[in-house]
């Protein structure tokens, strides 16, 4: 899993959330996290001063015509300072946001560029709640998508429904008072075949003389034609950040992609791998997370060991234990050539 490194922000709130669930970070855990981060930063600052002092001493010796027998001051540092230099702290909220943006951006582009006839009939749907986050349930978005797939199966037999969705919290920017309710809602875009119209999700439908309940009975919806689907989704994905992602109901999924072809799914999977896997695997390689850490190739059994190991404290602090060699400096998804090729 790819992570964005950042500082931990201790939880200053109560130990229980608005739904009465026990917070993942209790008050005691927050104080422990703060103390650990402070100690690591103190060690880093001290080691930085040590490096500076050693550098000045080396320059002074060089000025006098003396040459140090050591080529690196790092190995001579005390163990505690070496540990601090190799240690990182994961901002898990920011890591979740980074994964959302990668998955949504890559997924939407794959659906738009790899499909036949995709891009002309895009439908944007917004799904909101009339109440609060207490009315939210994990199955609501899944149930809605299941009903859309059932409709699409009857409307376009043999075809795959292509869609991407993103969760968002109401921020109140469109209100005069600027006060948002902080309630979860969803933005989805469906890549439909030409000539196919999407029914309104909050309306009752009659099918073969039988009335059917609305696909989304939890609040209002909005359905309109989309002309820039990737930009539309990314505009909402960019709103998510480490400051507000914790406001989603506990257990809520905040993005999803459906209908990718095998190539698109492989490209999206590659984009979500950590860098040390990307540098050793093409989109056709079947690497999966291995028990105990790292990634293993299902086809060959090759194991790429993780570059960082947890130091304790809820999998937030990690220390570098190795640097995995890269076969290629990958700047994007790629495939290995089937045989050696000579370039002239």
Image (cartoon, helix red, strand yellow):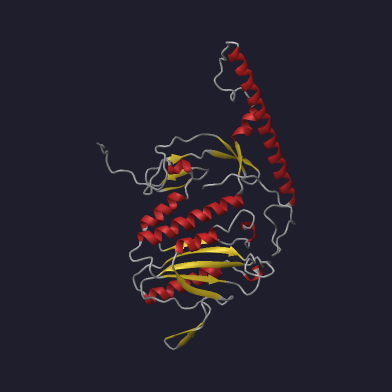
Q: In the image shown, does 260 or 46 lie closer to the viewer? A: 46
Reply above or below: 41 against 179.
Answer: above
Q: Residue 158's quadrant in the figure? A: bottom left
- Residue 259 occupies which quadrant of the picture? bottom left
Q: Which residue is at the front of the view, 305 or 176?
A: 176
Q: Residue at x 49, y 67 (%)?
A: 188
Residue 117, position as x, y percentages in the image: 34, 66
| As drawn, 204 above or below 241 | below
**Residue visible at 45% across and 64% down in the picture:** 229
Q: How many labels does the image show?
A: 0
Q: From the viewer's perspective, is 238 left or right of 296?
A: right
Residue 126 placement, left or right of 36: left
Which of 103 and 222 lies nearest the eye of the viewer? 222
Residue at image location 55% in from the left, 67% down from the top: 186
Q: Is residue 327 left or right of residue 57?
A: left
Residue 275 percent across, percent down from the top left: 47, 43
């Amino acid at each position: 899993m790819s992570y964005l490194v950042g500082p931990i922000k201790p939880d200053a709130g109560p130990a229980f959330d608005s739904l009465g669930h026990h917070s993942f970070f209790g008050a005691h855990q927050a104080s422990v996290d703060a103390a650990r981060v402070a100690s690591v930063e103190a060690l880093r600052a001290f080691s930085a001063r040590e490096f500076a002092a050693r550098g000045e001493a080396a320059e002074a010796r060089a000025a006098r015509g003396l040459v140090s027998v050591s080529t690196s001051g790092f190995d001579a540092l005390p163990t505690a300072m070496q540990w601090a230099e190799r240690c990182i702290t994961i901002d898990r909220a920011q890591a979740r946001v980074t994964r959302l943006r990668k998955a949504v951006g890559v997924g939407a582009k794959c659906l738009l560029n790899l499909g036949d006839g995709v891009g002309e009939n895009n439908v944007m749907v917004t799904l909101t709640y009339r109440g609060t986050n207490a009315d939210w349930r994990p199955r609501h978005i899944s149930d809605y998508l299941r009903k859309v797939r059932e409709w699409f199966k009857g409307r376009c037999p043999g075809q795959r429904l292509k869609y991407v969705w993103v969760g968002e919290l109401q921020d109140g920017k469109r209100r005069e008072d600027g006060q948002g309710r902080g309630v979860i809602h969803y933005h989805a875009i469906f890549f439909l075949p030409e000539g196919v119209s999407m029914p309104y999700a909050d309306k009752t439908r009659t099918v073969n003389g039988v009335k059917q309940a609305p696909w989304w009975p939890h609040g209002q919806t909005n359905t309109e034609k989309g002309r820039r689907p990737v930009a539309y989704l990314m505009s909402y994905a960019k709103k998510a950040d480490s400051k507000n992602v914790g406001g989603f109901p506990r257990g809520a999924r905040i993005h999803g992609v459906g209908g990718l072809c095998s190539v698109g799914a492989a490209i999206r999977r590659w984009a979500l791998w950590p860098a040390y896997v990307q540098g050793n695997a093409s989109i056709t390689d079947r690497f999966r997370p291995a028990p105990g850490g790292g990634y293993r190739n299902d086809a060959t059994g090759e194991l790429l060991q993780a570059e960082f190991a947890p130091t304790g404290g809820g999998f937030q602090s990690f220390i570098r234990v190795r640097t995995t060699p890269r076969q290629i400096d990958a700047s994007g998804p790629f495939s290995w050539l089937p045989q050696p090729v000579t370039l002239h």
